Image (cartoon, rainbow, N blue to C red):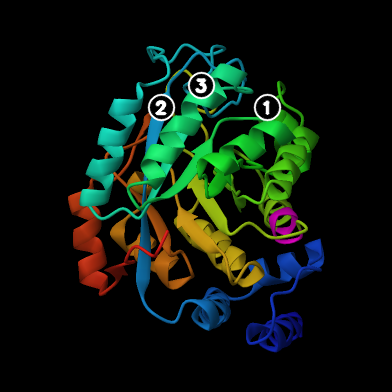
Amino acid sequence: MKHTNAAESLDSAAGGPPRHEWTAEDVAALFELPFPLLLDRARAAHLVHFPVPEMQISTLLSIKTGACPEDCAYCPQSVHFDTGLAPEKLMPLEAVVAAAETAKARGATRFCMGAAYRKPRPHEIARISQMISAVAALGLETCCTLGTLDADQARQLKDAGLDYYNHNLDTSERYYAEIITTRPFAERLETLAEVRAAGLKVCCGGIVGMGETREDRIELLRQLATLPSPPESVPINHLVRVPGTPLADAEPLDPIEFVRTVAVARVLMPASRIRLSAGRSALSDEAQALAFYAGANSIFYGEQLLTTPNPEADQDRALLGRLGITAEAAVGH
């Protein structure tokens, strides 16, 4: 009877406006559906908003690497862990523009810039704003992840031409303190609110495979789906286990559970881009294909994501070709 009730709930929502009142029990019922039924529901929700088999291609560049004061247990850029990563200062504007031009030539339509800050300082915001304007002038969508922002900083980035701001919740509020102690969960929600108030689109997701329970994955997705406005972009990261970090020996997440997570995210947030982000190199082609079927329709191109490995662009193009999925064309900026 549980499966039937969950199916009826989803069927009633599949063709109408997205729901926002999901409870933990609702989300748990989705996770508990037999895998084929869950994929069916996710695919139905996906096709309402994304009927054409296209993949959004993004590129992520670390514009300032390492020396981060945060203690995120998954991150090789933290000053708290010895991972052998050499810190690098904020890149010069010309180097960022050159990287964006290369990304565009290789098929990317969104260019994401990441900097290892807890909160950027005024002169750093000024320099990054120049980068945003220059990348936007190339006709690329722009995205940044720079840590905590206040209202003025969010407005400055918006005025510079920023389209999206990435600020992940990472995991459930319950499990959060096991992963990060230097930035409270509430502060992440405050930054998301400032980003929204500035008129920016939100890129917000989490990381799975960090030792969390299914209940934590349920709560993470429920929290994302019930934000005042769900994120337009939802990255689902599979933990990259980096030597020297506290999570270096974490137990890998079952690939089927990973695909379940993607499928539930698609049902809860049917109009959002669901992005397979970090950790794709650990997934087989078959697992990625299932995730694409379940609703993932955005990936990062390139050999590296900030400081961790990513499948090479040629490998991605070959997989998408085998699946008959085309790269999304650039839209008017």
Asked whether disc 1 touches disc 3, contact meaning CB atoms under 8 Å apart, the reply is no
Give the answer, above or below, for where 247 lies relative to 276.
above
Image coords of residue 118 (percent x, y): 62, 22
**Amino acid marked by disc 3:** Thr
Residue closer to the observer: 224 or 1: 224
Tell me the kind of residue under disc 1: Ile
Task: Give the alpha-carbon distance from disc 1 to disc 2, as whole Å.
Answer: 23 Å
Mark 2 residue element: strand
Q: Which residue is mark 3?
A: 245
Q: Which mark is residue 180?
A: 1
Residues under numbered marks 1 and 2 in contact, where contact means CB atoms less than 8 Å apart: no
Q: Earlier in the sequence, mark 1 or mark 3?
A: 1
Neighbourhood count class around disc 1 (C-alpha, 10 Å): few under 14, some 14–19, many 20 upward:
some
Q: Is residue 290 left or right of residue 5?
A: left
Residues shaded magenta: 222-226
Mark nearer the viewer, 1 or 3: 1
Q: Quadrant of the N terminus?
A: bottom right
Q: Is residue 162 magenta?
A: no
